[in-house]
Image (cartoon, coloured by chain):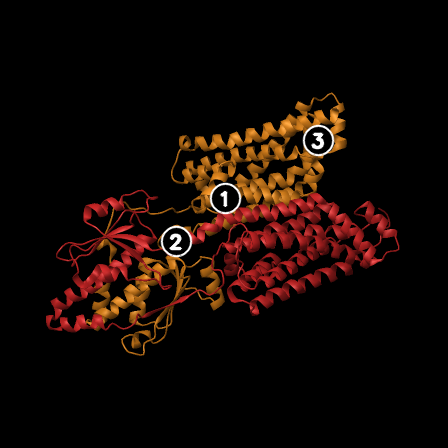
Amino acid sequence: MFFHIFISRLKINIRNKDAILWSLVFSLALGTLFYFAFNSIYKNAKSTTIKVAVVENDATSGYMDLSSSLSDLKYEDGSKILDIKKVDYDAAIELLNKDEDDKDRVSGIIDLRDIEDVKLEVKETGTAQSVLASVVSVYRQYISIIVETIKKDPSNISNVISEFENEAASLVESKSLSGDNKDPYVTYFYSLITMMSVMACMAGVIVPESCQANQSDVGARVDVSSVGRMTYELAGLLSAAIIQVSITIIGLFYYTKILKVNFGGDENLVFLTAVLSTILGISLGFFVGHIGRLSQKARENILMIFVVAGGFLSGLMVANMKILVEMKAPIVNRINPSAVITDAFYALNMYGVSDRYYHAVAYIVGLSIIFITGGLIMSRRKSYASL
Amino acid sequence: MQVFKSFFKIVRSYKSGIILYAAITMLMAILVSSQYDKSETTAYSNIKLSVLVRDYDNSELSKKVVDYLKSQHDVHFDDYEDDMIKDLIFGEYYTAYIEIPKGFMDSHLSDNKKNISILYDSNKAYGNFVALELGSFVDGVARFENAGFTLSEAVKNTNNAIDTDKFVVADNDDEGNTNSKEYSLFLFLPYAIMSIVLWCLLPAVLRFNGKDIKDRTMVSRLSPLKRNVCLFLGSTVVSMIVYLGVIVVTGVFIGSSFFSGKCLLSALNLLIFTFVTGTLLIFIASFPSEGVLKSRDVLVNIIGLSFSFLGGIFVPLEMLGDSIKSVGRFLPTYWYAVALRRIEDGGELDTVFQCFGMELIFGVFCLALGLAISRVTIYLSKS
């Protein structure tokens, strides 16, 4: 009997083409939109080699080998900080004033003509200009040390210069953030998969509606039949899960294999998490479908809170929202299913298979069991004096 | 008139949904605007960055380092667990986390020194900049001390050497964009309006497009044009009621500054957008009702989210790629966001008139298309 009902419910679900179509459109269209919207933001925020013009004169050219040591400066990852063009001042100004799109445009001019007063000339404020200012300030420090030493104790100058050559390692130790994909905009994809999963609740809520006599004609017929309600509901849940999980997997497959979005962490676990999350969404709908004798509209409203408000708080609309909630009211992130699902993907990316990931998965699985069990318990002994 | 009145009767049955949706979306808008009120110090708006600092040394030198960081950046001292710190840096809430270890000052000139650690995303220019800047100051002080200067002399000389006022020549002083609370709130409101209007009014309009009701209306003496106009007027009136509700909540949240020219112009912008949303509703409702009604939740989310992302409601326009912006230009949310940006930058009515016009063109297009599709389906069903 279970198999028979399962096949019937599966056919009903498959014939609901509009729901399947729009769910697919939701995941594919928004995924594509996110891909094109956020693909370049992180790349643009990356450290790039800054084009700079260096102006020297005959007297200062080669002094302390400043310009060549400038070109040797490197970021933590080993890439060069500066791309130097040695030109005269007029040519440097021309390069500085070029259009933004011009590949020869420089971000600033390092003016080494007066070695005691090294200047930086820029056209605007920005990251590149600030990095240049930091670089120039280091050279000004060396010059300042020499000048101040000459003022204070000229006899010490040779010691000071030899100290420069034997300079100890920096007092600042850089540590880079861990994680497979450090692009913060990947969280939009986490939130999208999460929303798809939680939206599966709309498929879950149909299961109890289809076997409650006060909800639909089919429900009335099922109610008077000899089929056990638990058998009917479990078969209905399984068929809904197969459709919804397929939709989620198609969406995730599209993101990871076609759009090549790097979710970070083990890809198999990403798929497993998405599948478990979809089951949580269905079980949520199943549970809400059993609460009291609520009308269909009231149930939709309750589920809408979970989908829209939960999605918002987990960072679907504004990526920082989850962090803001974590700072102000962390308990919300612990109990909001959308936030927990998003956190499972995030933990997998940043920390791999860790305690944090296990906690999130345990919550997803535990809550699914509670919702399904709760729903089944509530569905028992429901009888109707009149309809 | 009969259609107009019936429309309101149906809408009344959805009032709990309207109130609930309005409450949720307004809460969202208020939460977002509270967050963005601090945006003048976030990574993408200004070179003054948010940095988290922990000073375990609490020595003269460490205090000087903290003072220097305060002079350059927006420094925070909140206490978080290690995982949370990583989450905050990943989410770009802070650019870097700087930890000054105990014993830093005592050991900084010795061979066995305890270094300041800085955690950041090494891929990002901002993180690298903070690390470079911090290194420039701390190592600079150590260099002066190694050259025989006292700590206070070393700090003073380093500060002199790195004082940008003394060596940076800038043609112009671009201060970057800072967003006011009012701007952030008004920027999020189109999503609220779209969600409320589409979610709550779509079933009501679609009810009239159901086969039975539509057929009954068509055999009456009411012309198809009058019927469609009544539906449009009904949805417009309800949209305006939603708009008034949203504006009242916004006014209460913003306070007396709501009556400033900026806010009133922003409110006018939202009014036009609300009208356009009403026309969008008519367009969507002109399609066969059964399929649209069954997929209402997904459909409203697709439209609400995609319009908001493409139009620069959730993510600032300047951060979006050119391809996205070129698609966004066809949407009213884009022109709403552009108009709001101009208003925020001090623009008057004449500077945003073109944006209002573009929003209205979209609305007229939706309305014309919706009425045409509806007319054609009625004609086809008759034949």
Identify residue type, mark 2.
Answer: Thr
Name the element at disc 1. Answer: loop
- Chain B colour as displayed: orange
- Which chain wears red? A
* Residue A5 place in picture, x, y as percent: 82, 54
Label 3 or label 1, whichever comes before in sequence order: 3
Name the element at disc 2. Answer: helix
Q: Could you give the CA–CA distance between mark 1 and mark 2, rounded to whole angstroms? A: 20 Å
Determine contact: label 2, label 3, CB under 8 Å: no
The answer to whether residue B356 is above or below residue A93 is above
Query: Horizontally, is A377 left or right of A41 in the view?
Result: right
Q: Which of B358 and A216 is in front in this view?
A: B358
Q: Are marks 3 and 1 on the same chain?
A: yes
Q: Nearer the viewer, residue B155 or B240?
A: B155
Query: Horizontally, is A225 left or right of B222 in the view?
Result: right
Chain under numbered label 1: B
**To which residue does mark 1 refer?**
B313
The answer to whether residue A312 is above or below residue B53 is above
Q: Nearer the viewer, residue A337 or B121?
A: B121
**To which residue does mark 2 refer?**
B41
Other-residue count near label 1 (Cα within 10 Å), few / some / many at <14 / 14–19 / ≥20 = many
**To which residue does mark 3 refer?**
B6
Residue A110 in which image quadrant: bottom left
Other-residue count near label 3 (Cα within 10 Å), few / some / many at <14 / 14–19 / ≥20 = some
Identify residue type, mark 1.
Answer: Ile
Question: How many numbered discs sit on the rendered protein?
Answer: 3
The answer to whether residue A16 is above or below residue A256 is above
